[in-house]
Image (cartoon, helix red, strand yellow):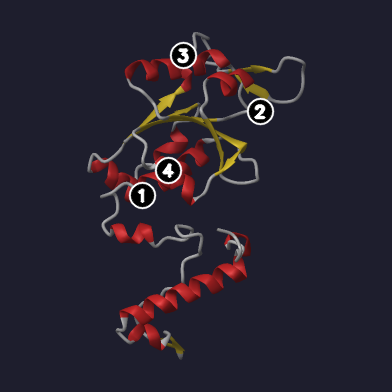
């Protein structure tokens, strides 16, 4: 898999994408992640990639020309399954979407910045717009890193225990059950006896019940209506 991230602030992505599971996936050649500096695609002597909005108003807008040049150069080298723009008004990013994107071969992520991007970029160049939540950040670099991390950990071989990803929260529309480790008794706070029993089927049933209860309590909107197919 290859993920190309176009950004005006490459340094914001250096640390998040060079540690932990993402780093190991890169070292194993399971994923190639490239950070493209948008300023390399402008002829402006000051390397500007933004300008004032037509019609006035506060804030600067990312210009279409450097974005177009960056995307066209990438597309001239390979085909892309998705060209994603990180935007507060995009579709909400969730585990199902991460699962879908993890099956793609080549993805471009355009990290938004300033007041946003020229609308023509969204109309003619972008295939998908994604939001990581109903709030506004200083730029799209952190959302791009979030999306990348969520995708990469799902690639077979990225995690030492592949079953771990399958039991993550939201994989089955349920929150993960509580987990415990040693010691079994700390300050009188004890691990549930069922987890010490060795009865695998009973433990799995307990975990599923705990997941349902936790989801019902904390995120009831995730549970489907009983009459829904």
Which residue is depicted at the point 58% across and 61% down? 224
The residue under label 1 is: 153
Q: Give SS at disc 1.
A: loop
In 3D space, how far apart are the residues under numbered discs 1 and 2 (Cα atoms)? 31 Å
In 3D space, how far apart are the residues under numbered discs 4 and 2 (Cα atoms)? 29 Å
The mark found on residue 115 in the picture is: 2
Q: Give SS at disc 3.
A: helix
Which residue is depicted at the point 62% across and 63% down? 225
In 3D space, how far apart are the residues under numbered discs 4 and 3 (Cα atoms)? 28 Å
From the viewer's perspective, is 193 left or right of 23?
right
Single out the mark in the foreground, 4 or 2.
4
Which quadrant holds the N terminus? top left
From the viewer's perspective, is 176 left or right of 78?
right
Which callout, 3 or 2, points at the residue further toward the start of the chain?
Answer: 3
Which residue is depicted at the point 33% across and 51% down? 20
The residue under label 4 is: 100
Q: In this view, does 164 lie above or below 135?
A: below
């Amino acid at each position: 898999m290859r993920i190309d991230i176009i950004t005006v602030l490459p340094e914001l992505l250096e640390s998040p994408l060079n540690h932990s599971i993402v780093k190991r996936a890169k070292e194993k050649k399971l994923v190639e992640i490239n950070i493209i500096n948008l300023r390399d695609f402008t002829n402006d002597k000051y390397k500007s990639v933004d300008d004032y909005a037509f019609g006035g108003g506060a804030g600067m807008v990312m210009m279409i020309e450097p974005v177009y040049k960056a995307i066209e150069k990438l597309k001239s080298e390979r085909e892309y399954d998705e060209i994603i723009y990180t935007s507060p008004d995009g579709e909400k990013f969730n585990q199902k979407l991460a699962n879908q994107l993890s099956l793609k071969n080549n993805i471009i992520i355009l990290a938004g910045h300033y007041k946003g991007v020229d609308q023509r970029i969204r109309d003619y160049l972008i295939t998908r717009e994604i939001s990581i939540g109903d709030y506004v950040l200083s730029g799209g670099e952190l959302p791009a890193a979030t999306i990348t991390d969520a995708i990469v950990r799902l690639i077979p071989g990225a995690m030492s225990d592949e079953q771990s990803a399958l039991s993550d929260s939201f994989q089955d529309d349920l929150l993960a059950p509580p987990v415990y480790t040693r010691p079994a008794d700390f300050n009188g706070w004890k691990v549930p006896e069922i987890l010490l029993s060795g009865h695998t089927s009973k433990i799995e049933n307990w975990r599923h019940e705990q997941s349902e209860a936790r989801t019902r309590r904390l995120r009831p909107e995730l549970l489907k209506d009983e009459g829904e197919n």
